[in-house]
Image (cartoon, rainbow, N blue to C red):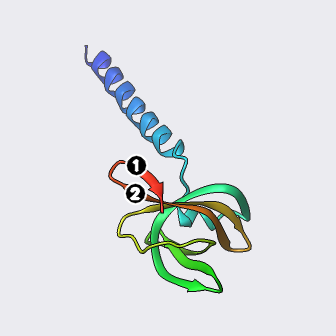
Amino acid sequence: MNSKRLSLAALLIFIAIAVTTLYHNISPYTSPSQLLELDYANDIQVVGKITDLKAENGMTVFKLTDSNVAVKVVYKGSVQQYDSEVVVIGDWKDGILYAKDVLRKCHTEYAGG
């Protein structure tokens, strides 16, 4: 009887680990830390918080951070400083994320910002 309980406990632990691993691996979003591991990427979705927001030469330039690292983002459009996380969709090349869209978190959805 004890061996059946032990086997069941081991199976439940395995299932819990598998579900947790799959959940974290299927996220469509990349963090700035993960982005730095890539040489380039097209149409990548990066989630983080905006810092150092400023306008430069008709562009909006800011950093996107995950609290560990920050990456430079260049966006042709206006962006506000948000307290919540945003998703930046764009192309990563030469150490810069060239944003095509910046989406901010609104309640349970992401909306253009």
* Nearer to the camera, 11 or 70: 70
Which residue is the site of mark 2? Answer: 105
Mark 2 neighbour density, 10 Å: few (under 14) some (14–19) many (20 or more)? some
- Mark 1 residue type: Glu
Comparing 36 with 11, the one in front is: 36
Front in this rendered view, residue 19 or 8:
19
Q: Residue at x 39, y 25 (%)?
A: 11
55 on left or right of 94 = left
**52 to the left or right of 7:** right
Q: Amino acid at mark 2?
A: Lys
In the depicted structure, whether residue 12 falls above or below residue 46: above
User: Percent from the top left, x then y, of residue 7?
Assistant: 35, 21
| Residue that numbered label 1 is attached to | 109
Q: Are marks 2 and 1 in contact (CB under 8 Å)?
A: yes
Residue positioned most to the top: 1
Real-space CA distance between mark 2 and mark 1, rounded to the nearest whole angstrom: 6 Å
Q: Is residue 86 above or below residue 80?
A: above
- Residue 15: x %, y % from top left: 41, 29
Q: Residue furthest left?
A: 1
**x then y, percent, for residue 92:** 69, 65
Residue 49 sits in quarter: bottom left
In the displayed structure, does residue 72 sit left or right of residue 93?
left
Numbered badge on residue 11: none
Name the secondary structure under disc 1: strand
At label 1, counting other C-alpha atoms closer than 10 Å, the crowd grade (few under 14, some 14-19, many 20 or more) is: few
